[in-house]
Every structure is written in C-alpha cells, then in structure tokens.
Amino acid sequence: MSGRRLVLSACSVLVLTTVPAVAVAATDATLPSTEEKVAGLTQAASPVARGLIVQTTSGTSSATLERAADAAAGSEVEVVDAERLTGAISTVGFEEPVGYDDAADLAAEVEQRDDVVWAVPDARRKASVASPVTPDDPSFPRQKGVWDTAYASPAGGYSTKAPSVWRSTQGDPAVVVAVVDTGIRKEHPDLKNQLVEGYDMIGADQGDDAQPLPEGDPHRFYTANDGDGRDSDPSDPGDWINANDRYCYPTGGNDFERSSWHGTHVAGIVAAQADNGIGISGIAPGVKVQPVRAVGRCGGWDSDIMAAIAWASGAKVSGVPVNATPADVINVSLGTAAATSQERAEACVPYSRIFRSIPAVVVAAAGNGLGNANLEVPASCSGAVSVAATSEWGFRAFYSNVGSTVDLSAAGGDDVIARNGILSTVGTGSRGPTGTGYAEYMGTSMAAPAVSGAAALMYSLGITDGNRVEEALRATVSGFRSSSKYSAVSLSDGTREYLLNLNCARTRCGSGILDLSRLPAPIGTPTVSGDLVVGEPVSASSRWTRTTAMAYQWMRDGEPVKGATSASYIVRPDDIGHRLSYTVHPAAQAYELIERTSTSSGVVPEATTVTTSGLPTSLRYGVPATVDVTAALGGVPAAGTVRLVRGASEVLDTATLTAGGTASFTISPTRWLAGANALRVAYAGSSEAPRGSSVTRTVTVYRAVPTLTRLTMGSVVNDTSNGTLWARVYVPGVTHPRGTFGVYDGSRRIQTATIAADAHGIKKITLPRLARGTHTLRVKFLGTSVVAPKTSARKTVTSR
Ligand SMILES: [Ca+2]
Ligand SMILES: [Ca+2]
Ligand SMILES: [Ca+2]
C-alpha cells in the first residue's frame, strides 16, 4: 500500500479543440499563474454578452442579419435568432452567453458590413437574483461557485447557494473540518482566524526496499519538502517540482511546476473568514479548519494519507500525539485512478476500513481524469462521499470523472468551457512561500470542499451523525441542467483527443448538484403564539430558510404531551400551572435532526370554569331555548361576562354575570341555517380575571314544522274566470316566514307563488282557468333550508 502515490485533484492542463454550439475561443485554457490571478483580483468579474445589438440601414431583414452574424461568428458562437428591437435596431441572440471580449470581436466584424451602422454586445448589466446574504468580502461577487447572480431561474444558478443557509448560521466554531492536503499558509489574512491545530503527517520517503530512505539521502524528505518527517507544523513549504526532475518523473523531461498552495485553496473554500472586508468567504465561514499535511511534492503516499485521516478523526496514530480537536468532516481533495477494478478493490480495503471505523464524514474528490470515477482511490471506496464537479452552467465540468460511485456533484469551476474557476485563498511564490493571495482553480478538488463546507453547516445545525450527514448531503441537491447539447465536446492535452459527454445524470454525477437553498434551516428561535387559555388554541411559530413539511411535539414543562403533534395545540386543564413549549424539525428523514425547541410559554393560568344547564344538543328552528350559565374561579362565583359563540368567533350574545356568577342566554335559532352549529359558552374575562374555560357543544338545528291554512277557495269556480285563493304558512317564532307555495291539480303543479318579505306568510294566489269538471286541488308550502315543506288537505273544486 505504501508504494502508492496519490496526487492532488486540481486540474491538469487540457485545451478544448472543438466545442460544438459553445462559445469558446480556446486560446488559453491553461490555468493562469497565481500571480496573474492574484493581480486580477481587484478587477470586476468577467462580463458576458448574450448576443449583439445591431443598427442596420433600412431594408435589411432580420433573417439577413441573422445569416450575416452567423457567418461572422463562424463555428465559435452559435447564433440562434435575430429580431427587430425597435426601428432599425435589432437583436441577435447567442445560444449561450459568451465572453464580452469575444462578443465585442464579433460585433466589430458584423459592423464591417455595408448595411450595418453599428453593432455592440448585448451585455448583462445587472444581477438577476442577489444573494440572500451578501458578506462584505470584496471578492464575494466573483465567487460564482457560492452564489451566481447571473441566473433568474434557478435563483443562484448552479452554485452551492451557501448564503441561503447563512440566514440561519454560518457555522458553529465547535465544528471542525480537517483538510487533508498540502498543508496551509497560516498567515493568510482570510484564514488565520479560522484554524485549529493540525499536523504534518508526511513521513520520510521510502526506497525500493520499502524502508525509509536513510539519513543523508537527498530524497529522504523529498515529498515533505520541509526538511523533516512528521511534525506538529502543517505549514505548506511549497510543492514545486523542478524541470527534468527524475525523482518525481523517472523518465524526466518535465517542465518546471509551480507550487500549488492547494491545501490553502481548499481550506478557503471551506471556511475563509467572512465579513472581514478581505477577499472571499468560505461556504461555512463560522467553522474551523484543521490543516493536516499528507501530500507534498509529487503527491503523497497512501500510508501518510491514511494516517492523516485517522489522526484527524481522533484515532490513535503511533508516534503522534492525539488530536485534541477531532474533525467532524474530513476533506480529501486528492486521489488517483486505479488501472483496473481489481487494483481499485485492493486499494480500497484499508481506506474503507478507516472510513467506516471513524465517526467523521469523509468527503473525497472524484478525480479529474475526464473518465471513470469508479476507479478513483479513495473517492470510490465505500465509506467516502465521492464528489464530481459541475460547471456554473449546470453541466459536468469537462475534467470531472463520472460514474455510479459518485454521491453528488458540486460547483468545481470550469475555466475552459464556462470560463470561470473557483476563487480561493493561496500562498504566493512559485517555489517557497513569498506571501498570500487569491487564485481561481478548477477541479473536483474544489467541488469536494464545497461539500465538506455543506457538511459542516449540517453539523452546525444539529445533524451530528455522520451517516445522517451523508444522507442529507445526497438530499440537498437540485437537478442537473437538462440538455443534450454537450453530448460531444472534444478536448486535447496535446497528445490525445478526448471526446466528452458533459450531460450529467444520476447514474454519472450522483444525486444532483449541491444546492444549500434546499436545506431547511431555522431562522431565529421558535416561539409559542396565542393566548394561554384552557380550551383555546396556541400555535407554533417558527421560521425556516425553506418551506417544507414540519413535525411538532408539544411539551408541558419539557415533557412531551402524548398525541400533541400538530402545529397548533388546544390548551388543556392539565396544563394549568405549567409552561408549554414544543420541538419542531423538518419531517423529511434526512433533516429530522435539525430540531429546535421553542421558548417556553408563560405559566398557563388557572381558568375560570364555566358550567351550563339547558344547552341542548338539538333545537327546532324558531323554537327558543334557555341556557343557564354558572362561572366560578376556585369555587368562588366569577365576575365579568360570558359569551355565546357560534363557530370559531361569531359572538351571538353576551351576558353579564350576576353576583352569584350566573347568567342565562336565550338561544333563538332563527338566525342560523338548519344543520350542525358549534355553540360555545365561554367566560370572557373581566378586568381582574383572564378569559377562562368554555363549554362547547354541537347543536343540530332542525327545520321548523309549519302549519298551513288555505284562507279562501270556494267549491265551485267559473271556467271563464281565474279563481283566487289565499294561503298562509305559520312558522313558530318567525314573524315573516319566507318561501314559495305551489298549487297542484292532482299531481300537476298549476301555479307557483312566492311570499313577500313582510307578508306574515300570507300570499294571494291567482289560479289559471280550470277546465270544466271536478278538480282535486292542494296547496303546498315547498319548504326552505330552515322550514320543512307542508301540504294542505285536498280540496275538491268543480269548474262549470
Ligand atoms: Ca515535516
Ligand atoms: Ca512541517
Ligand atoms: Ca474574507
């Protein structure tokens, strides 16, 4: 095992050759030098254009303009449409935004045409969706992997969207993320307050006999590069490699490689200090980083990396003092691809054994091999969270390995196709350290610490079980950009062509792209709202960064109240003299450990009790009932008022209690519809006493039973004139019953008449002429929602 060298997962140098339908001038796809990037830090973020705005001479059609722009663009920019903006000004759209400079070049070319007056890039002028939290760090706007303002939908684009969680927490300083890497530049102003003690776990290099090289051997500390073996100082001395270095490159012929300051870059992505007016902000700027040095020049050894992981988690490593601040999350932005699945399986045995024996979450980079993530060691080993990289466009970053062992993806920068890297902290100096600064790197090395930062935020919120954190990480994602346009991207490293599919899918890039706006996090402390009155509801009041189904448990003096698991709670007599509170957590299993306990309510006061007699379970419409009420507090008659309430809040009547604490209501059910009515008699309080208990009963109001009179109707009518009859309906307790009469001749209705509003239920009904003969007539009151129908006796009438 100790013979394996693992290398950093920062990206190797590749150049795009042809990229169909993508705007890339692939002239300089290599990583710019650190100094160039540091110098560029004060400049504004690279602007983009989504098309051109063109003024033509009259008579140039949009179609002509589109063809012209397309011809000028060649294969580098895909022109999708052109349309008239206003007058002779038109817009030409690109399929994807392109760099402003490229668009300006294209505009200049289009402007050469005789029928074009001028052409300028259609540039973005304004952020679409601002970050929910904007720290004062001056380079925050350039941190497109943290919050990308270029998208209106999805808000924050395909970034990590950590500012969504920052409304709740930026991380708990008790949470530690170990960065197993090249070490750290502790003096970096954006990191110096963010660190806990780490360790340098790089031992002496080994010879062919698998024994440490002897003292005096010039390569004894070649990897360590700090002149000694394991020591307590994880400072990064630099990992440069000289030209034609035959120790790292046995066949020689290599160019000089600058120091990467990789561990410092990764540490800044996790937890660069926020709101200090300097540089950038990490994903979890409130937590601590523990730098553990395990890779140096030319990479590092499995044995040192495993020792670093074990030590970081708090496990014993022989010859090394125990870690006083064991890490909750361990970031491993390094690895190499095994040649075969057999080799990978063998290499994973000790790694998985360690991963499974420690409580910490291990997050590892899936590798930048443009190939199979399932061969990457240690990311593909079971027990590690394997992270692939996506670009700011929501596609696979071109370099990222993909495969079924990937757990999720995260923004890792793509400086070649999407033209943006991940900005973070670095040391400066091409060999040893000369200072500190910032640089954009891309790689799964940059995606993994975004996930580690997310895991640290989850720990800070209360998901302190490593398995639950892994589950939550896989759940806290949004979907990949759906498109097929990147199904064939061709790149070259100068010797080999790579044909890449940049479309992500769950089988290739994990469950989705890390999206912390999907993480429900509490904002502030939950409270109990509502009046503490027995029989009345109180409700849970809590704010979260995301609306999602919540689970509640109400508590009485901190003890759960059985069955009280809704957002609201009806105060019970048992609660008198106790305080109420509740716990609340997202219902989804992945987040259920993010639980908060509300502040406690005041003490539930002793309630004035109300008793009633005569409150019926049913009433007849129009027939009043009398309810006697007694209110007492501790056996003493209560003063104040009582209310008769219908439903939730409709006060039907109010009565003042007598000196004996009694009152009575006359329930006169003419104001209600028939059916079930929830009636409540409640103590309404007084200047001395709070509101008290109530008595609630469902009262069913049946329809009134009317009586019907037919006032006048002779037994004989003339067949040449209209007969008349008077009908009247009586409804007990109702002065002016409403409704409709029907007059029937046998079973046939021959007339219908509606009673006027103030007619005492009386209606004069004019009948149609009746054919000669005998008719059996009836008058029927047809009934209403509150009065039942009623039919008169038959009446035989003869028409002559
Ligand atoms: Ca050392
Ligand atoms: Ca050291
Ligand atoms: Ca900062």
Image (spheres, helix red, strand yellow):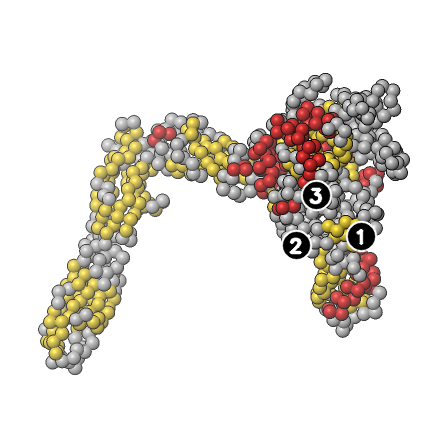
Distance between the Cα atoms at labels 1 and 2? 21 Å
Residue 184 visible from this viewpoint: no
Of tags 3 and 2, the one toward the viewer is 3
Residue drawn 17% across and 63% down? 791
Q: Earlier in the sequence, mark 1 or mark 3?
A: 1
Question: What residue is rendered at 80% in x and 46% in y?
Answer: 14
Q: Is residue 792 left or right of residue 191?
A: left
Give SS at disc 2. loop
Residue drawn at x 27%, y 53% is 674
Quadrant of the image occupied by residue 794? bottom left
Q: What residue did someone put label 1 on?
A: 17
Near mark 2 (Cα within 10 A), the count class, few <14, some 14-19 or many ≥20, is few
Q: Tell me, for residue 483, which label it has, or none.
A: 2
Residue 718, position as x, y percentages in the image: 13, 79
Question: What's the mark number on residue 372?
Answer: 3
Amino acid type of disc 2? Ser
